Every structure is written in structure tokens, then in C-alpha cells.
Image (cartoon, rainbow, N blue to C red):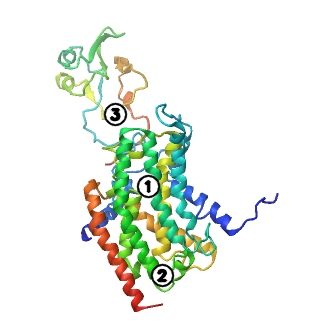
Amino acid sequence: MSVHLKLFTVAVKNLFERRWTVRWPEERRDYGERVRGFIVNDKSKCISCQLCEAVCPAKAIKFHLEEDGKRYPGIDWGRCILCGYCVDACPTGSLQHTAHVEITWRSLDTYRRPREMTPEAVKAERGTAALV
Amino acid sequence: MAFPIPLTPDLIAALVFPGILALFGFLVVAIWGERKLVAKVQWRYGPLYVSKQIGGFLQPIADLVKLLFSELVIPRHTNRFLFAATPVLLFAAEALPVVFIAAAPGLVILYSQYGVVLAVVVWLLVAVFLVAMAWTEADKWTYIGAVREILLTAAYEVPLLLSVLAMVMLYNTADPLKVVESQSWLWGIILNPLAFIAFYISVMMSTTRFPFEIPEAEPEVVLGPYTEYGSTLFILSFGGIYVKMYATSLLGVALFLGGWLPAADTVTGAAVTALKLAAFVLPLILVRAIYPRYRIDQALRVGWTKLLAISLGAVALSALLRAVWPS
């Protein structure tokens, strides 16, 4: 009998715990600022050395000829595995992680051309950070 | 426009409380409350999508509507008439004990001098419908569920009858109104706690609450006797569990928690009964978050040893109390 009372006590105690659910997408988890999120390229620093394309294990980076006559990396974020090798390999630091790791796509076209790659392109559309 | 039928108290009882309206209300509230409470114990939100402002309260209603409009499949290899008829019969049979129980002074659907006993008898006959339903479905899992239901019935019915007998002996009446009135100075739970324990565990077994959720064990038999049903028949068969919970909890409130006391008139009496009903049901739905499932043999052993001993002790205690205070 005492065992059952103890069990009920534990259950009632847990009634007043705070909830751990993250109600995605209204809330999003806060991963901090230095998470290996989706990668964007800063065209002003890029020197078109193509080291990122060479090092990419998922073959997610392809180079494009842009209007200014230079080639810049375009990243397929559906292929990208967020390993950060290209960021490490980049000699000028033009490829950088953003803080976003959760993106929902409305189509299967997950490829981002160089001109589409701005940090604002991966902003969370809605929701607040849940500090879980 | 005048109401075509004279509004007698028993008609009001049949339509509102403890009748149809309260029954369906209980169905919705109990399902929602169970999901929310268990979620709260497990540190998560329960259903929240349908109506966020009131805590997802409309979720069970939305589920009911969704089930109503889903396709009703009646397999060809079964006896199709029986397949469709047995859930309806089961639902009606599980609601039947309510007929004999008084919820407030004057609020009893069918007054009988032996109301409590009749309610218990009807309650115990429900298992027959359940087994018939499982047999009609002609499915491996429903057979297993039916056999488990029979075993569980065998485990709980003797202690249940003995605990009710103890209370009837104690009050010296089986009249649903007099049973409550004889608790005016002390509730039955204080007079005979042994009988209450036996009765409560029997209710748990009968409504297959969690430590005894053996017939519809989801990992083993898909839904036990309710496996083959969809749509309306699923509402009727599966909601039958909650209807049974409602009926048996009403009986428990009348027998052990003093019914509508201390209120004296009908309306406040019904309110007090509803509150006590909620208090009676709350542990029953919280228990899903607490216990694992018993094995069949463990449940049978509990029923045939400890529970039987407790209920026999309850009868002995009642006899002793009658001997000490003949009033």
C-alpha cells in the first residue's frame, strides 16, 4: 500500500513540473549563437579559390559565373550536412555559418544561388525562441 | 409550443443528469481530462491544436466528428448484422447501471427498492456483450481480447459483489435513495474502508484502467475486442469504456462518498454529486500515467487472493458494525 501511495505522490509531484515540449514552429529551440547552422557566402570577401567545392564531402557546392565575371559558390542546402569543412577550408572567411539549423522548404528546390545567399534568407519565419 | 410529454422528474433524470446529456458530457470531459492530466504528469502539453485558448478542450469533440464522418467498414466474412448491432448493444448495456442509481433526491430514472443490486448485476452482465462483440468480429486479436476480458471479469466480479454486499449489509437496504440517506452522519468510505478499496480496484479492473489494462493492451493485441471497428461503431464500442466508468463511478459515489449529501434539494444535490463524481474519477484517469501493465496471471492473482481477502474482510467488518450499532 505504501508503494502505491509513493507512486501517486510522484505523479502528483510531476503534475507541477514545467513542460519540456517545444511547440514548434510557434516556439523554436535556442541553440545559442555559435551553432553550425546553414552556411552563407559573403561575396565581398570571396576570392573564388574553389577550395570549398573541393573539400565538400556531400558535393553540395557548385560554382557559378556571376555578373561581375567571378565565380561564386552556390550551396544546395538539401545536400549540405552542416559539417563546416568548407568554412574551415575557406582562406578568407567568406563562408560563414548562420545561427539557423531549422528551415522548412515550400518546394523541393533547396538550391541557393550565390545571389540568393544572404543571412536574411534563412531567418525563421515565425516563432519565438524557447529556452529549453 | 408546449412540450408534448409531461416533464416528470424521472424524465429529466433520464435526459439530463444522470442520463444522456451528462453521459455524453462525461465522455468528452473524461477523454480530454485523461489526455491532459497524463500529459501534464509526463511534462508535455496534451491536445492543444484544436482550441488553444481553452486548452484543447474541443479536441475530443473534433475527434468524434472526424470519426462520425469516416468510412464505416463492415467486413464481408462476418455476420454483418451482428457486427453492426453489438457495439450499440454494448454501449446501451454499459449505460444501463445509471438507470437504477439516484443522483439527487428525486433524480432517479427507474426507482426500485433493489436499485443498487440491480445496477451491479447489469454492470456484470456487460462482459457478455463484450465477448459477443469480440466473437462477431471474427478476428485473431478480438478473440484474444475477449478471452482476456473473461479472465479479468472472473478476477473482479466476486470481490465487487462482496464489497457491494458489505455496504448493503451495513445500510440494511439496497434502495438507492435510502443508501445515501443512511450515510448522513458518516460516509461509507469511513465506515468501511476495506469495502471501498475492494470496490475501487474492482472498478479499475472493470473499466480496464491501467494496471489492469489487459484486454486492450496495445502492444500485444491491437485494441483487444474493439480492433475491427471504425467510425461510429468505434465511438460506440470504445466510448463504452468511459460510459462504464461513468456508471460505476456514480454507483461508487452513491455507496461510499455519501451521494448528494450534505445538500438536500435536487439542484444543489446534483451539483454535489457531480463534484464527488469528478473526485472519484480523477485517480482513475491519473492512474494511466503511473502504473505499468500487469501480466494476466498477476491480475488474476491479485483478484483471487488479496482483493478477495479484502472484500471478505469488508463483509466481516460490516457484520461487526451491524452487531455493535444495530441502527
Residue B221, percent from left and from top:
34, 43
Q: Position of residue A50 (x, y in %)?
A: 21, 14
Q: Which chain carries label 3?
A: A
Mark 2–mark 3 Cα distance, whole angstroms, equals 66 Å
Q: Which of marks 2 and 1 is nearer the N terminus?
A: 1
Mark 2 Cα-neighbour bin, 10 Å: few <14, some 14–19, many ≥20: many
Label 3 – label 1 distance at C-alpha = 52 Å
Mark 2 vs 3: CB contact within 8 A: no
Height in image: B53 above or below A104?
Answer: below
Q: Name the residue under label 1.
A: B127
| Pick the front one: B13 or B110 | B110
Q: Is mark 2 in CB contact (under 8 Å) with mark 1? A: no
**Amino acid of disc 2:** Tyr
Give me the C-alpha separation between circle 2 and circle 1.
28 Å
Q: Mark 2 points at which residue?
A: B171
Which numbered mark, 2 or 3, is in the foreground of this view?
A: 2
Q: In this view, does B254 lie above or below B240?
A: below
